[in-house]
């Protein structure tokens, strides 16, 4: 099914001004007109293109799910709650350095580090939290740079800007770790109906992260700084139900904030998201509800399965069977 491709002014009207922007960064770094500024994407000047990659790649413009699924997996879109997948398992890292800094089971950082070590990729685009909770995409080339990005970022980040910019350089085989809207944008880049100038052929591995919502930067930051020294914040976490709190790590210990207060800052676009588990990735990673220290891993492609098996053979992760009750609840949540 073909989709109408419009231009940057249409993107500004239909997505940005309509409060549907996910801040994925897919439209940034392609041309000089779109920029990111403190948690927002802005069109800084008029562009006369009637059709643009910015519109074609955006996860909030009409999407050809059949086409994205076909080019990602070589199969029709299944309609399954978890998308196309081969297997769902539990896993946790055996790397102490990563476990000390990572979230839940530390599997994402461990797999990226292994892929670099084994030269499956030569660089990885990750999300890094900078000053005052502002996050952005960054290029990691070694374990030290991976560890600097470890942990969850609940504030929306224009991570794909880093892919668009770095893919123009000499890197040949890049990985991207992203949330579902970013993974969808990468899928749309792969079926680009316009001129081939986005270097998507350099994308060798996609690791998706489970996501139920992301927070608007400015509003959340202003809320936190009233009572918390934001420059001292370490890990941020949401414990499993029934806790209903958002935890902020501080030197003196974790501070809990009611999730009811935090949800006020969820980006409006998250209410219309169709994907919780990053369906168009090579493998998807999230928490295991009710089982501390483990990750859920959804294996989707042969490449994703090969990476997990290599990690198991290298004894850098432990893999276990996903309990049936957890898998059932995961599918219910994804629906």
Image (tube, helix red, strand yellow):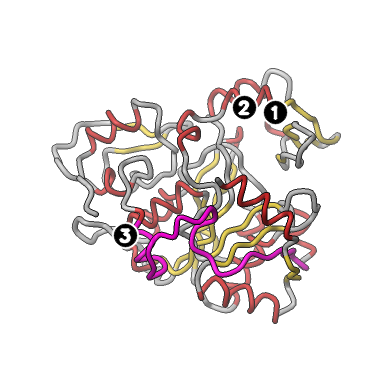
Q: Dots 2 and 1: beta carbons under 8 Å? A: yes
What secondary structure is found at the residue carrying circle 1? Answer: helix
Could you tell me residue 219's position as x and y percent? 55, 23
Pick the front one: 312 or 232: 312
- The percent position of residue 136, horizontal first and vertical second, equals 51, 44
Does 104 lie within the magenta span? no
- The earlier-in-sequence mark between 3 and 2 is 3
Which of 172 and 256 lies nearest the eye of the viewer? Answer: 256
327 sits to left or right of 45: right
Mark pair 1, 3: CA separation? 37 Å
Circle 2 residue: 263
In this rendering, position of residue 305 left or right of residue 2: right
Residue at 34% over, 25% down: 17
Residue at 21% x, 56% y: name it. 193
The quadrant holding residue 155 is top right
Residue that lies at the very extreme toward the right in this rendered image = 252
| Residue under numbered circle 3 | 67
Segment tinted magenta in the rendering: 66-94
In the rendered image, residue 222, in percent from the top left (x then y), is placed at 60, 21
Secondary structure under badge 2?
Answer: helix
The residue shown at (22%, 33%) is 9
């Amino acid at each position: 099914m073909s989709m109408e491709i419009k231009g940057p002014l249409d993107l500004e009207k239909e997505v940005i001004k309509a409060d549907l922007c996910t801040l994925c960064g897919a439209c940034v770094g392609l041309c000089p007109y779109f920029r990111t500024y403190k948690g927002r994407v802005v069109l800084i000047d008029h562009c006369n293109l009637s059709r643009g990659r910015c519109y074609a790649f955006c996860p909030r413009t009409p999407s050809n799910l059949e086409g994205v699924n076909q080019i990602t997996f070589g199969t029709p879109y299944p309609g399954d709650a978890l998308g196309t997948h081969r297997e769902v398992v539990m896993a946790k890292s055996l790397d102490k350095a990563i476990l000390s800094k990572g979230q839940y089971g530390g599997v994402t950082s461990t797999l990226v580090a292994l892929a670099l070590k084994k030269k499956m990729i030569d660089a990885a685009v990750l999300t890094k939290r900078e000053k005052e909770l502002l996050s952005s995409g960054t290029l990691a080339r070694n374990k030290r740079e991976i560890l600097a990005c470890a942990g969850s970022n609940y504030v929306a980040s224009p991570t794909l800007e880093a892919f668009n910019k770095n893919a123009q350089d000499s890197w040949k085989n890049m990985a991207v770790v992203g949330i579902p809207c970013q993974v969808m944008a990468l899928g749309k880049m792969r079926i680009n109906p316009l001129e081939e100038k986005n270097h998507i052929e350099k994308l060798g591995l996609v690791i998706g992260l489970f996501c139920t919502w992301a927070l608007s930067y400015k509003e959340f930051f202003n809320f936190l700084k009233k009572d918390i020294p934001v420059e001292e914040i370490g890990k941020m976490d949401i414990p499993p139900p029934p806790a209903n709190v958002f935890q902020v790590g501080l030197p003196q210990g974790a501070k809990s904030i009611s999730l009811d207060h935090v949800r006020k800052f969820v980006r409006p676009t998250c209410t219309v998201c169709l994907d919780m588990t990053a369906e168009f990735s090579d493998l998807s990673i999230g928490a295991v509800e009710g089982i501390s220290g483990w990750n859920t891993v959804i294996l989707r492609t042969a490449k994703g399965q090969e990476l997990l098996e290599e990690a198991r053979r290298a004894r850098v992760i432990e893999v276990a069977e996903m309990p049936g009750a957890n898998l059932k609840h995961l599918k219910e949540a994804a629906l």
